[in-house]
Image (spheres, helix red, strand yellow):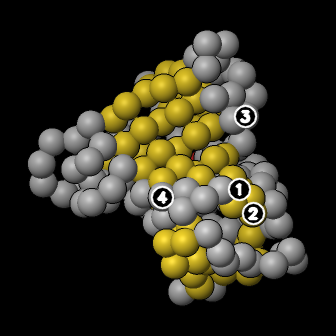
Amino acid sequence: TTQIGNSGTTGSLGSGPVTLNSSLTINRSNALDLTQPISGFGSILHNGSGTTTLGASNSFSGNTTVYLGTLVASSLNSHNNGTPALATSSLGAPISPLAAVIGLGSGSGSGTLRYTGSGETTDRPINLRGTNGATLDHAGSGLLKFTSNFQATGASSKTLTLTGSTTASGEIA
């Protein structure tokens, strides 16, 4: 596991391409832009209270989990049963339904996924993981449509907050 930060305002990956062979944990309390391409078989875990923006040229094949804070993505991609719709996206190129899961929240925190793209349809499932709620923030400009069933792991009730811009629309099919 590689970790950026320790609940503070420092820590980075440098400026070159990143290859994940396990997980990348982001634990910063402020804004962080990760614009370099991220590839490999690993996953991304956002566990800091800050906001991290991922670039759109990522091809990592693991899942994405936002335990705490906000993760900003301009593209989500689809898994298409092992054939990702796109070679790259902000959340990589998942190679299976399991790797495509986007987890939001944890037992002690609320996670937010902020979408800033121009619209897309995705078959990536959302897993509501925590008891403190989760947020989908559609800050993009076109239709954002989720076609897979949502999941809710762990005991207790779950809360999903939907927010967004006044020009975009969203759909949970």
Label 2: which secondary element: strand
Marks 4 and 1: in contact by CB < 8 Å? no
Q: Nearer the viewer, residue 98 or 44?
A: 44
- Residue at the (43%, 57%) spot, across then down: 68
Q: Earlier in the sequence, mark 3 or mark 2?
A: 2
Residue at 75 percent of width and 63 percent of height: 34
Which type of secondary structure does the marked residue at label 3 adopt?
Answer: loop
Disc 1 secondary structure class: strand
From the top left corner, tell me how far across and down residue 173 is, in percent. Answer: 44, 25
- Hey, what amino acid is under mark 3? Gly
| Real-space CA distance between mark 4 and mark 2, rounded to the nearest whole angstrom | 16 Å
| x and y, in percent, of residue 8 in the image | 55, 72
Q: Of discs 1 and 4, which sits in the foreground?
A: 4
- Residue 15, horizontal then vertical, whole percent: 86, 74
Give the residue displayed 78% in from the left and 52% down from the top.
56
Circle 1 sits on which residue? 54
Which residue is the site of mark 3?
A: 117
Residues under labels 2 and 1: Cα distance? 5 Å
- Whichever of labels 3 and 1 marks the residue nearer the N terminus, that label is 1
Q: Amino acid at mark 1?
A: Leu
- Residue where numbered disc 2 is placed: 34
Residue at 75%, 70% in the rendered image: 38
Q: Are marks 3 and 1 in contact (CB under 8 Å)?
A: no
- The spot of residue 39 in percent (x, y) is 74, 72
Do the CB atoms of the residues marked 3 and 2 lie less than 8 Å apart? Answer: no
